[in-house]
Image (cartoon, grey):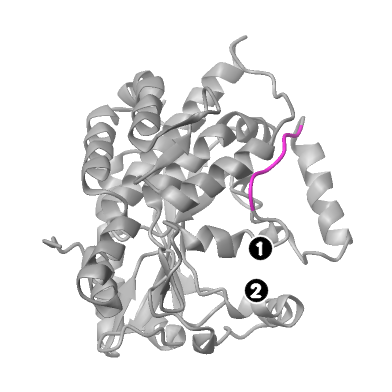
């Protein structure tokens, strides 16, 4: 049985001429269907929700179609959209929160964290049988998630400065009190008690503020990947979705046998591996989840492909995922492409590259 997947993508809104963020989400969304497009905390971003798919080909067509609709709506206001973790010329002065009691509470409670929430991610949902299974699968897939972050890394600049990181969005995101790697739980009841404890503590206001790298959805029968930057190329989002689905299916199969690996309770290395991926992207070393030692990014990515090949083949995804992964390794991360363009020209050119890739345009930079 093929497991269904869906993708949520977040997009920055920028002025075409300046590359600056603009808080005009409400105006852009007036031209778009509310069941597919919605607001974010800041008015300089919008979210697109795909339909549910069984194949990567139809998922790709859906993502491309949604991007085209969003681009047309933004262009009508003289704007462009950027699918990337950050945009090079983002400024906290661009902050303009969306109305509503929930967002108003977040702005008042978290102050600069909310003001600087000028970041965008890509989230992948994969069907699971039930919440108990989702919670068990979380522990199984967590050691591999930093590799997906490296593939998606697209945020080298912040406030006009080169951060030296491939995913500065990750560093900003991990300041939130519930962001980062998740621990292991015996079942959904144990997980839900933990969430309720965080709400009762007053640190967060609702389950939607659980920002772990992976989590069971609080309203769908899915496991949700949340670690990744938004991806300028729709192909990269499809690659991440295909790999995450394979990770979940592989874990489901192992949980049904004696092959499931008992958790050793050691999760500090996961945060370290995430930092390494955020720093290096595909252009440096990553932590190999099998050995927990440093290894070239290409070796770690290809090692994941080897491990998941039987599952990818069973899904009919092997040829697509392998080709997309090899292209990603050949072209480098989006962070690398944006940084290289900015170094050759300027930050606006880096933004223009991200705009073009979001539109699906082929570039020579």
Which secondary structure class fits the magenta region best?
loop
Q: Are marks 1 and 2 in contact (CB under 8 Å)?
A: yes
The tag earlier along the polypeptide, 1 or 2, is 2
| Residue bounds of the magenta highlight | 180-185
Query: Which residue is disc 1 drawn over?
Result: 175
Q: Give the quarter of the image for residue 155.
A: bottom left
Query: Which residue is disc 2 drawn over?
Result: 113
Q: Residue at x 61, y 86 (%)?
A: 99
Q: Residue at x 51, y 45 (%)?
A: 276
- What secondary structure is found at the residue carrying circle 2? helix
Query: Which quarter of the rendered picture does the C terminus lie within?
Result: bottom left
Looking at the image, residue 336 lies above or below residue 349:
above
Given the current orientation, which residue lies at the most extreme top position?
258
Query: Which quarter of the rendered picture does the N terminus lie within?
Result: top left
Asked if residue 159 lies left or right of residue 83, the reply is: right
Q: Give the quarter of the image for residue 79.
A: bottom left
Residue 300 image offset from top left, x and y in percent:
40, 31
């Amino acid at each position: 049985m093929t497991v269904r997947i869906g993708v949520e993508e977040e997009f920055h809104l920028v002025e075409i001429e300046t590359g600056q963020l603009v808080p005009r989400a409400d105006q852009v969304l007036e031209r778009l269907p509310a069941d597919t497009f919605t607001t974010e905390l800041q008015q300089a971003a919008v979210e697109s929700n795909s339909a549910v798919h069984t194949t990567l080909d139809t998922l790709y067509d859906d993502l491309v179609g949604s991007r085209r609709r969003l681009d047309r709506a933004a262009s009508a206001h003289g704007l462009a959209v950027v699918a990337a973790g950050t945009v090079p010329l983002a400024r906290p002065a661009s902050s303009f929160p969306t109305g509503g009691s929930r967002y108003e509470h977040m702005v008042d409670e978290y102050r600069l964290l909310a003001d600087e929430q000028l970041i965008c991610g890509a989230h992948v949902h994969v069907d699971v049988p039930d919440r108990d299974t989702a919670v068990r699968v979380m522990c199984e897939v967590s050691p591999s998630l930093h590799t997906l972050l490296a593939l998606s890394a697209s945020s080298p600049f912040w406030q006009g400065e080169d951060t030296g990181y491939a995913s500065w969005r990750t560093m900003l995101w991990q300041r939130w009190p519930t962001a980062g790697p998740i621990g292991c739980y015996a079942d959904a009841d144990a997980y839900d008690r933990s969430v309720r404890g965080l709400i009762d503590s007053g640190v967060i206001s609702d389950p939607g503020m659980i920002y772990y790298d992976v989590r069971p959805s609080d309203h769908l029968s899915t496991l949700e990947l949340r670690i990744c930057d938004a991806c300028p190329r729709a192909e990269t989002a499809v690659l991440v979705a295909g790999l995450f689905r394979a990770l979940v299916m592989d874990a489901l199969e192992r949980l049904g046998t004696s092959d499931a690996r008992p958790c050793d309770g050691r999760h500090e290395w996961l945060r370290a591996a995430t930092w390494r991926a955020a720093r290096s992207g595909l252009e440096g070393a990553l932590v190999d989840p099998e050995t927990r030692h440093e290894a070239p990014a290409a070796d770690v990515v290809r090692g994941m492909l080897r491990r998941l090949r039987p599952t990818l083949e069973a899904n009919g995804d092997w040829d697509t995922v392998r080709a997309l992964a090899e292209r990603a390794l050949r072209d480098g991360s989006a962070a690398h492409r944006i940084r290289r363009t900015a170094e050759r020209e300027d930050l606006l050119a880096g933004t223009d590259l991200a705009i073009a890739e979001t539109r699906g345009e082929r570039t020579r930079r």
